[in-house]
Image (cartoon, helix red, strand yellow):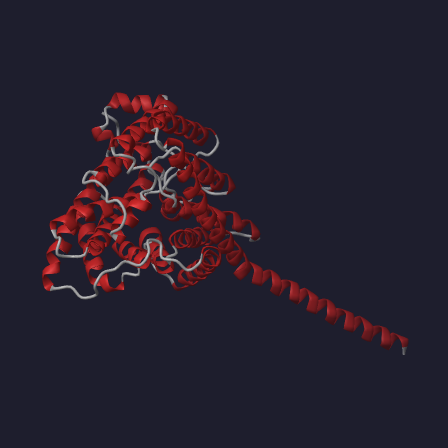
Amino acid sequence: MSDSGSSQRLSGFDRLHGRKRRFRRDLRRGWQNYGVLWAGSIIIGLLAVLFSDWTNSVLALFLRWIAGRAWLALFITPAFTAAGVWATRKWFNGSEGSGIPQVIAALHAPPDPNRGSRLFGLRVIIGKVGIGLLGMLGGLTLGREGPTVHIGASVMYEMRRFYPRVSVRTERLLLLAGAAAGLSGAFNTPLAGILFAIEELSRSFEIRTSEVLIVSIVISGLVSLALAGNYLYFGQISAPDIYPVAFAVPVLTAAVVCGLAGAAFNLLLLRQTRWIPVRLHAWRERSPVGWGAVMGLLVAVIGIAAGGQTWGSGYDQARHLLMNQGAQVGWFYPLAKLASMVLSYFTGLPGGLFSPSLSIGAGFGHWVSHWFIQYPQSALVAICMVGYLSAVTQSPLTSFVIVMEMINGTGLIIPLMATALISSKIASFYSGPLYLELAHQKYFEVPEERRPTRG
């Protein structure tokens, strides 16, 4: 009798212990399948909103410093640039530039066990945020969207630690999801985040990948929505939904202008050895901090000469042109902004190209609106923003969707699509996609015998 009771108690204990074991296993499996992704997406959404607020604050602080005494920029901008270059080289190597080429390299380059720790992780997040803010505090023409993509990928790279084993495919999937969530959180454009991941980053489409992307983007977007509200990045434009057939003329004109301008920008960045003297390249390698200070000084000179129109990412200028309100920019604005953007990129500081590219495109739209005054300026500005961004990235679907979501421009779908496709095609005659080319130049391992020699 006692043996039977003892056996029953042991059997009940075994059943209870088995249920606990199954519960822990299910909990662990649920955390690995969903919890890691959700937690990472929440962190990305939070960082995207905070980084946006911080960038606005530091640029406003810089503008207050130089208000009424623009000459101070001749000291502030070079000093902050030099400090940022020194810190990037010493502690935050891998955080330079927009961050999108780093993600592309991680997704497509041959496996390298050291690449992840060099290009992603907590150290890179700190450098991306801290040094990026330092550059913006100096008035450089830098955006926050590319860095937010890199930050998102780095967050997901750190979240891989919660998996017992991580394959190369799983790590790349996490990086892709984090990058897409970062773009979506930066612009509040979830659809563009999906297209960006497929068209620009992965250049492929898988069912499993799409599920992970959508979950990451939705959760990151919800966090951004909760903290920043449901907003349009540039606001609602005022433009008619129906245009005459003759509207094809300004659309084609805008596409050609922006396609050529975007190609010129890409060539300036990708073919530096062809137009920068060899001695300057050698000095840049020997003294990167001095080089950064000179680039910062040139940015300051352009900013002062342009009447302060080229400081920062150019968001305010693009918004004013889109809304046809406030002080209009000068005819020289897109050229001066483009020059300031090239010089800012040459510093090597963390900073993106998305917002400045949209602002440059808006400046070209201001040109086109003066050539075709019978059409709304807001429509032509939006079209040129798409055209220039598409020419630079050569990702036409992402470019037109991202601008459409920013301005709620559903009435301009056909003109935006046409401009994006034509501009991208024109730019492709001169160079490959900017981010992909930069990834190959900087982060792909090139065999010794295939490395170009400097002449």
- Give the residue furthest to the right: 2
**Residue 270 seen in the current view:** no
Q: Residue at x 15, y 64 (%)?
A: 243
Image quarter (top left, top right, bottom left or bottom right) of the C terminus: top left
* Coordinates of residue 385 in the picture (x, y in percent): 24, 50
**Image check: 140 left or right of 390?**
right
Asked if residue 17 lies left or right of residue 224, the reply is right
- Asked where in the image residue 397 lies, by quadrant, the reply is bottom left
How far from the left and from the top, in percent, is residue 280?
28, 23
Which quadrant of the view contains residue 241? bottom left
The residue sitting at 36% across, 57% down in the picture is: 232
Q: Nearer the viewer, residue 49 or 420?
A: 49
Q: Is residue 110 above or below residue 135?
A: below
| Residue sitting at the far bottom | 1
Q: Quadrant of residue 196?
A: bottom left
**Residue 268 appears anywhere in the view:** yes
Work out whether 452 lies above or below 57.
Answer: above
Depth check, front residue: 175 or 415: 415
Give the image location of residue 121, x and y in percent.
Answer: 49, 43
Residue farthest front in this picture? 68
Would residue 255 appear left or right of 107 to someone viewing this image? left
